[in-house]
Image: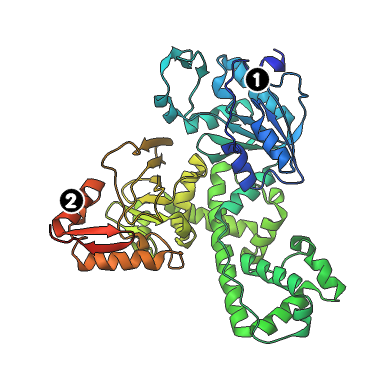
């Protein structure tokens, strides 16, 4: 079958004025860069291609209906966005995937409509999909089903969940591992400002600060190639990286410097444990296949890859122990704890204990990044992690739940629930407990909680967990909310 027939001509083009979700994710994950080329295989009217080219990217596309004469060419990144779900013939569907993969030098992006969107489409069953009332075909994939299909058709490839309904397929295992490691790397603490003036530091501040930021993030000295030119600047001043670090230690102060480096090494150790524990699910790489920077991190923190893997395996075995997970939830210093779950804001995930980070990471291997989710629910009663979306979390004093995506780790299935049309959705209280103390609105959230506690509004909390229940409590006690302030209602 010719490749030009791998996509039906009645394909519905993506016509959003902004970049599509797969392209947006790939940009955010650093897969599409100023130095890479992109080919959109089945680009529809080419909105992504046009927008990317306007932004200066090397982007091209082909579509059987809208750009049939365009050249089909290899590229570093190939996008197969919402194409396979509109192909009726399973053989043609597989050919489209295989053809797109043959064009990808680095990574293939595959996106398809998830199974929970089927309820939004009217039509009748046709083959393994639905023939819609508009006369188009749609196949809806479960998350686990889409991954299994990709891996089955592209045997031996490294397939990574990017988001619900979106997967990355890598040529190089090292590139996949770099992405997975970056997902669990904690943000480094702000670097300390120098306490004393030092001529060498002042003369080469930019290169010194880059070195300082690297050490604060990785807990070790970098190799010259890891500093993106800063090593050359230091070399021009006859400073080795080790000598420059000694200058930093002097200007920061030995006590503070040692404290910062120790903290950075602890973060690096935790990040590597989480990464290696999760890598066991996607075929942990051989030591020789590790990205160079990760291999250096492991050697600096653990001494050897075997030691690091042994420690990660011990951590991973504890994730299978619901009692250990329950205890870790109960001991967590961050998050809102209930009898059923620990709830944390995405901004606080890096503050969780490594065991809980691996617990959440197991779910993310299945779901990918759930872009709209801002609250993570870690179940204490079974191996389930839910990604909850509260769009008005910052603005509304008691935001309502919009959507929930739950990963059931025992059954390896994903369930989606939509509360946006509900008249009585669940709502949140005590928002400051979900977020880290340095969260921009922490004090505002905490002040409201103190007011509501003094008013007795948060007692018997089982009855106030929904919008209607909460409003009934406010009415009963004679209060209303004005932003994040509690106001006593005037008697009528």
| Mark 1 neighbour density, 10 Å: few (under 14) some (14–19) many (20 or more) | many
Q: Of discs 2 and 1, which sits in the foreground?
A: 2
Give the image location of residue 119, x and y in percent: 39, 25
Measured along the vertical axis of the image, is residue 102 above or below residue 429? above
Horizontal side of residue 45 vs 242, given as left or right: left
Nearer to the camera, 198 or 377: 198
Separation of disc 2 and disc 1 at Cα? 58 Å
Nearer to the camera, 405 or 304: 405
Q: Are marks 2 and 1 in contact (CB under 8 Å)?
A: no
Measured along the vertical axis of the image, is residue 386 above or below residue 105? below
Residue 303: image quadrant is bottom right
Measured along the vertical axis of the image, is residue 152 above or below residue 282? above
Can residue 156 be seen in this snapshot? no
N-terminal-most mark, 2 or 1: 1
Q: What kind of element bears circle 1? A: helix
Furthest residue in direction front, as rendered = 492
Residue 5: image quadrant is top right
Furthest residue in direction bottom, as rendered = 196
The residue lying at 74 percent from left, 75 percent from top is 205
Give the image location of residue 367, x and y in percent: 49, 40
Nearer to the camera, 480 or 121: 480
The residue lying at 38 percent from left, 41 percent from top is 403
| Mark 2 neighbour density, 10 Å: few (under 14) some (14–19) many (20 or more) | some
Q: Which mark is residue 95?
A: 1
Q: Which mark is residue 116?
A: none
Q: How is the image coloured?
A: rainbow
Disc tally is 2
Q: What kind of element bears circle 2? A: helix
Horizontal side of residue 28 vs 470, given as left or right: right
User: Quick one: quadrant of the N terminus?
Assistant: top right
Q: Which residue is mark 2?
A: 472
């Amino acid at each position: 079958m010719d490749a030009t027939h791998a996509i039906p001509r009645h394909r519905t083009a993506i016509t959003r004025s902004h970049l599509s979700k797969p392209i947006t994710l790939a940009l955010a994950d650093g897969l599409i860069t100023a130095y890479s080329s992109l080919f959109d295989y089945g680009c529809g009217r080419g909105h992504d291609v046009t927008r990317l080219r306007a932004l200066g990217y090397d982007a091209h596309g082909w579509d059987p209906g809208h750009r049939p004469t365009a050249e089909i060419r290899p590229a570093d990144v190939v996008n197969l966005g919402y194409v396979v779900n509109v192909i009726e013939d399973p053989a043609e569907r597989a050919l489209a995937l295989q053809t797109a993969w043959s064009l990808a030098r680095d990574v293939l992006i595959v996106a398809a409509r998830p199974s929970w969107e089927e309820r939004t489409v009217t039509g009748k069953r046709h083959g393994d999909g639905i023939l819609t009332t508009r006369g188009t075909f749609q196949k809806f994939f479960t998350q686990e089903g889409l991954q299994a299909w990709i891996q089955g058709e592209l045997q031996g490839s490294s397939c990574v969940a990017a988001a619900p309904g979106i997967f990355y397929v890598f040529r190089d295992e090292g590139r996949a591992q770099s992405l997975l490691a970056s997902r669990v790397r904690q943000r480094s603490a702000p670097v300390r400002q120098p306490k004393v003036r030092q001529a060498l530091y002042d003369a080469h501040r930019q290169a010194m600060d880059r070195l300082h930021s690297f050490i604060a993030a990785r807990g070790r000295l970098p190799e010259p190639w890891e500093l993106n030119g800063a090593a050359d600047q230091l070399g021009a001043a006859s400073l080795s990286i080790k000598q420059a670090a000694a200058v930093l230690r002097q200007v920061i102060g030995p006590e503070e410097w040692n404290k910062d480096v120790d903290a950075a090494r602890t973060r690096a150790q935790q990040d590597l444990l989480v990464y290696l524990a999760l890598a066991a699910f996607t075929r942990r790489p051989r030591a020789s296949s590790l990205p160079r920077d990760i291999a250096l991190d492991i050697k600096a923190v653990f001494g050897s890859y075997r030691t690091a893997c042994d420690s990660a395996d011990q951590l991973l075995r504890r994730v299978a122990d619901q009692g250990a997970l329950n205890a870790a939830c109960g001991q967590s210093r961050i998050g809102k704890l209930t009898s059923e779950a620990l709830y944390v804001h995405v901004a606080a995930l890096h503050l969780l204990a490594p065991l809980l980070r691996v617990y959440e990471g197991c779910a993310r291997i299945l779901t990918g990044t759930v872009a709209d989710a801002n609250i993570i629910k870690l179940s204490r009663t079974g191996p389930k992690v839910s990604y909850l979306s509260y769009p008005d979390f910052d603005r509304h004093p008691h935001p309502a739940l919009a959507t929930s995506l739950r990963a059931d780790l025992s059954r390896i299935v994903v369930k989606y629930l939509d509360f946006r049309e509900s008249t009585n959705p669940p709502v949140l209280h005590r928002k400051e407990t979900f977020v880290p103390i340095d969260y921009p609105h922490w004090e505002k959230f905490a002040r409201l909680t103190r007011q509501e506690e003094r008013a007795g509004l948060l007692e018997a909390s089982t009855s106030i967990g929904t919008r209607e229940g909460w409003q009934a409590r406010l009415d009963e006690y004679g209060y209303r909310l004005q932003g994040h302030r509690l106001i006593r209602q005037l008697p009528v």
